[in-house]
Amino acid sequence: MKNTIQIFCLSCLILMFACAQKKQNETPIETMTKEASPYQILTLTNSNGMKMTVTNLGARVMTLLVPDKDGKLLDVVLGFDTPAEYLTSPEPFFGTAVGRYGNRIAKGKFELDGQSYSLALNNGANSLHGGPGGFHNVIWNVEEADDSHIVFTYLSKDGEEGFPGNLNVKMTYFLTDENEFKITYEAETDKATPINLTHHSFFNLNGEGSGDVLGQELQLMADQFTPVDSTLIPLGENVPVAGTPFDFTESKPIGKDINQENEQLKFGGGFDHNWVLNKKEQGALELAAVAYSPASGIEMEVYTTEPGIQFYAGNFLDGTAKGKGGKAYEYRSAFCLETQHFPDSPNQPNFPSTILRPGEKYEQTCIYKFDTK
């Protein structure tokens, strides 16, 4: 009997020690998956002090801490303190992954291989960023993660938000020692479908909640843009930016021409348009934009394999969204640079195709690279 008790006690001690070691070796990601909440918050860091937090809700970037010219870390993306707040925000796209189709599709309709499809509408008469149940509002699977990268996957089922085909998406976020926030996208489908994935962080290089971005500077590597109608659907043509407020071929303050008398600015309430990038080679990773804050000294370069970039100057922010620490996100207090194919491409035969077919693989890369000067 005495020996039995000793063996039992020894077994208990071994089990307790093993459990303690397992708990000590768990990553924060593994620990959070055991909580009742479906939301995870994951953290990436690099050797230069940069830090990024991401939630699996929409694969959203919640914070992005970047050193300014004095070495002080500034959070340069708008957002909220907790994942659940994103679901009730008056601005639904803070920091999110966007899909199945980034940007607008006219009247939420398109025809593909002789069949008509109707999508969920969430932007007046149009479908925007995949519809109300798009990738921004789904729980992404975290396949793997460490301090430098996160691999997300998601199966968008046939018929989700009206889109055809089961679409398997793999998206990887990296935070590199070159101060790059890098995103790679891969996708495959079992039925022909439009696809246009992008990232939708709202940037303020003076720090989120610090006022408007009109004094921050922007250069776009684009000699043309795609004009739109009053509902922000492209007219189907590429127009030179020369001699218009849309000329960002040389760096200039975002606010310099934003209030000019111009029909296109009136339609967008300011800049909310697609620029046609000057690609040397289609599909190559090339510089698309450079943003700079004279106040903080932070510079952000944007690289993409995509043919276009949507520049949005925060025209619909109005202070009703209360972000981190209760800060009100006021009018034009952020800008977005969304690398993409063109809006409404499924209905625009002159635009680069966004149709993915079975047996093909969708791939693209986007990089936001930070420095100071």
Image (spheres, rainbow, N blue to C red):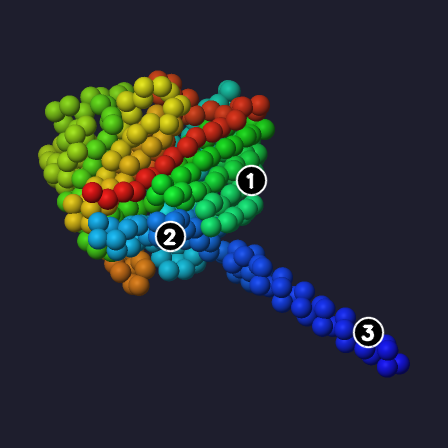
Looking at this rendering, what residue extends furthest in the right direction? 1
Residue at image location 17% in from the left, 33% down from the top: 251
Provide the secondary structure element on which disc 2 rests: strand
Picture coordinates of residue 176, whole percent (x, y): 40, 42
Query: Vertically, is 344 above or below 15?
Result: above
Cα gap from disc 3 to disc 1, whole angstroms:
49 Å
Provide the secondary structure element on which disc 3 rests: helix
Residue at mark 1: 155
Picture coordinates of residue 341, whole percent (x, y): 37, 28
Residue at mark 3: 7
Q: In the figure, residue 84 lies in which quadrant?
A: bottom left
Query: Which comes before the other along the chain, label 2 or label 3?
Result: 3
Residue 342 in view here: no
Query: Which comes before the other along the chain, label 2 or label 1?
Result: 2
Cα gap from disc 2 to disc 3, whole angstroms:
48 Å
Instruction: Sort mark 1 into few (<14), some (14-19) or many (20+) by Cα contacts within 10 Å.
Output: some
